[in-house]
Image: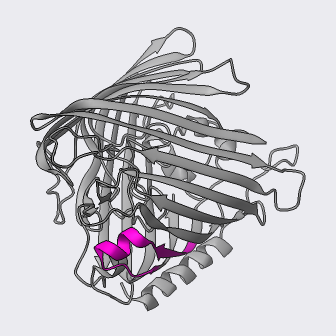
Amino acid sequence: MSVHRFAALFYMLVAILLSRPEAARAETGTPLQTPPYRLNRADEDYRYLRDSARHIDFWDPLKYVTLNESGSWYLSLGGEARERYEYFNHPSWGEAPQDHGYLLQRYFLHGDLHAGDHLRFFSQLQSSLEDGRKGGPRPADEDELDLHQAFLDLKFAVGENGSFVLRTGRQELAYGSQRLISLREGPNVRQGFDGFRAMLRTGDVRIDGFATKPAETNRRVFDDGPDNTRALWGTYAVLPFPLLSGGNIDLYYIGLFRRKAGFDQGAARETRHSVGSRLWRSGPPLDYNFEFVYQWGSFGNGDIRAWTAASDTGYTLSSLPLRPRFGLRADIASGDEDPANPDLQTFNALFPRGAYFSEAGLIGPANFFDLHPCLDLHLTGRLAFTLDWDFFWRESADDGLYSSAVALVRSGKTSDARYIGSMPQAQLFWDIDRHLTFVAIYGHFFAGPFLKETGPGEDVDYVTMWFTYKF
């Protein structure tokens, strides 16, 4: 897709926005509310549309198609399109070939069939395309057409308001802050998993157990099978934490197997176990998110001992203009202490957010510590602006620099410098309406001594913008 076609799409979406009908109102004159679209579209529930008075959106006839007189059998259809432009000056700090920017396109189409209260089948197609990148698409840039999700749910009632669901098939997984298990929203191709999942929901308690293999990301049509070289299993619980006002706690165990894992000390078979806890509160004025993980297992003939601690604390001054939120993130993850020793101390973030620290995705959460102050401003109810500056160091001077996919980016064997560099960013988020959003980001990475000594160590300029339309 050319830049001109990107602009044409924008004007088409604006035309759709301007021509949309006004929202319906209840007899009191209060606008009827519709729930927002979820990140994982399988988490949406359209049973409220049994009430015909709630049909106020253009797409509502597709969201609840009744298949029997009572409406207990119904089909829900939906989809989304994301058109994204991305540009790096000195990509990979000058290591990758320079281009003039490229376009990333992503399309989803899904169907959600409910056969009564106990049986459900959900299926979702994904098409992700790349155009114009010098050197061709990266591993998570392109997948022409494939089955992204296809699962069957069996649901059973637990008590008055609880439920227990058994799910089998291809599905998205995302837990907590998506530091360890994510659906990978930032990159063009999202991550799916093949396997089984059991979900208990009762009151404020949510407990999951899962046993899966990640789905492959191959570029052609319907060629994404399960990755038999890797496996992911575990259990994850979310509970209220009454000792802290408004607090919650996540407790989890996650197991990972990789037939061939690569780190700065070499490549070998990896079996890794992670136990963690997350304390969090999401409401203003004070929000916080603290997470602690310890890992053990085996790497070839050596033992794994690794850890991480992460924090994100913010305070919102709702009484001030623009409702500013002042935040500070601080994170640390262990690195290997001696590449000549078969034991491994490098933290593995498993399947984290693709854009872990920023959409640029230059650095991943292994062998690092960072300080990340940020300021969020709400220009209007739908328009937000964020300024932040992230500073990075290596936790161990004997280990290298890794990407979000836990792939080695720069070896640490030729430099003792710890300081990697810093990246200020400006980000604009515009929720144009329920369906259409726009995001624009500019960042500049100042390369530090470690990057310069391992070379090339050019500063990086990064620009991206995208539109997403959901229905």
- Horizontally, residue 413 falls left or right of residue 458, namely left
For residue 165, which quarter of the picture?
A: top left
Percent across and percent down for residue 100 are 38, 90
> Is 89 in front, or is 268?
268
Q: Is residue 262 visible?
A: yes
Q: Residue furthest front?
A: 416
For residue 131, which quarter of the picture?
A: bottom left
> Is 387 in front, or is 34?
387
The residue that appears at 50% across and 86% down in the rendered structure is 8
Does residue 58 lie above or below 426 as drawn?
above
- Coloring scheme used: one colour
Percent across and percent down for residue 102 are 37, 82
The residue that appears at 53% across and 69% down in the rendered structure is 423
- Horizontally, residue 466 falls left or right of residue 274, namely right
Q: How many marks?
A: 0
* Residue 194 is inside the magenta segment: no
Does residue 41 lie above or below 23 as drawn?
above
The residue that appears at 64% across and 48% down in the rendered structure is 55
Does residue 88 lie above or below 318 as drawn?
below
Percent across and percent down for residue 376 are 71, 60
Q: Residue furthest top?
A: 159
The residue that appears at 18% across and 65% down in the rendered structure is 219
Percent across and percent down for residue 292 are 47, 33
* Residue 458 is inside the magenta segment: yes
- Horizontally, residue 261 falls left or right of residue 468, namely left
| Magenta segment | 440-460
Q: Is residue 154 visible?
A: no
Q: Quadrant of the N terminus?
A: bottom left
